[in-house]
Image (spheres, rainbow, N blue to C red):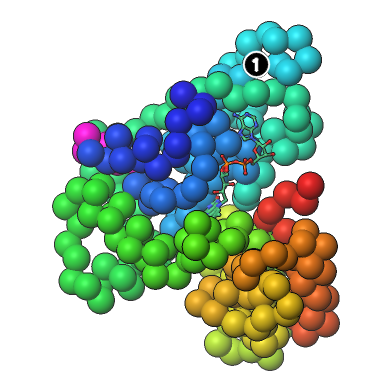
Amino acid sequence: MGGEMWQNLVEFAVSRGYWGIENLSLIPGTVGAAPIQNIGAYGVELKDILENVEAYSIENGEKKIFLKEECEFGYRDSVFKNKFKGKYFISAIVLKLSEKRNQHLRYRALQEFLDKNNIKVESSKDVSDAVMEIRKSKLPDPRVLGNAGSFFKNVFVSKQKLKDLLALYKNMPYYEEEENFKVPAGWLIEQCGWKGKKVGNVGVHDKQALVLVNYGGATGEEVKSLSEQIISSVNSQFGLILEREVNLI
Ligand SMILES: Cc1cc2nc3c(=O)[nH]c(=O)nc-3n(C[C@H](O)[C@H](O)[C@H](O)COP(=O)(O)OP(=O)(O)OC[C@H]3O[C@@H](n4cnc5c(N)ncnc54)[C@H](O)[C@@H]3O)c2cc1C
């Protein structure tokens, strides 16, 4: 149901041996919020396992089932962030998980972690445990250090832009995805010297440059201003415009 914590659903499925959801372990928040930005991590997005979304119109209370195709899922995006923003309350989702082994281990950080620790994947729990370990080592716990997870979206570039960038930055990481190329926003931010930088009450996390942190008492304005400075320096150095993953309210 929509009000359940996402991680409880992950644990429920993994403990029963189902495959499909394990890469999405430890993403904070509720099940009902998951379709809003098509949550994703470690090479899997919600859209890969979702069948449909049950929702109620906020205007007239009418129930509607959104089939996956109707959700218009994209990278951290869905119809619920666009055409139907604020228009529906999501009460439940239906997922299609697999009883058969169906692993997604191609994501580089995950692969490296499994190799380095000599982990032979035998169950979805093995993957879930690995993902949780990686996340705990890289992401600050919001209960300890205020943060909203990844603040910016990764950047998609054309083949030509990728070529131009690689000519200047030979070590730039990138991933091919459906004829486009994804460049990690964290790497771009780090190259501009922001990683670990503190500006007043806010800063850029020292282990993951994609995460902005609140050291205590930061105002929304401070966070927004830091994000604007980062967007501006990435634009001047790389000619790429970072988009925020978080919602500004
Ligand atoms: C430390 C950290 C790590 C994170 N890592 C990831 C990650 O790896 N991948 C990823 O994709 N995200 C990640 N996030 C972002 C966050 O976990 C997701 O966006 C999550 O879905 C938010 O859930 P929530 O319940 O807190 O929703 P909120 O932040 O409260 O709401 C998000 C939006 O969804 C709407 N909404 C919430 N519930 C419903 C509902 N039932 N019906 C209709 N609209 C609703 C809200 O109005 C709001 O617009 C991370 C966040 C943190 C803090």
Residue 221 screen position, x and y as percent: 82, 62
Q: Quadrant of residue 238?
A: bottom right
The residue furthest front is 217
Residue 196 screen position, x and y as percent: 59, 82
Rendered position, 21 above or below 62: below
Q: Quadrant of residue 11?
A: top left
* Residue at image point 61% right, 57% down: 148
Q: Which residue is mark 1?
A: 56
- Chief secondary structure of the magenta portion: loop
Looking at the picture, tell me which residue is in the foreground, 180 or 193.
193
Residue 58 screen position, x and y as percent: 73, 18
Magenta part of the protein: which range?
A: 16-20
Residue 17 in magenta stretch: yes
Residue 223 visible in the snapshot? yes
Residue 161 visible in the snapshot? no
Tell me the quadrant of ligand 1: top right
Q: Is residue 128 left or right of residue 210?
A: left
* Residue at image point 41% right, 63% down: 135
Q: Is residue 130 left or right of residue 1?
A: left
Kind of residue at disc 1: Tyr
* Residue at image point 30% right, 35% down: 13
Looking at the picture, tell me which residue is in the foreground, 180 or 63.
63
* Residue at image point 39% right, 64% down: 136
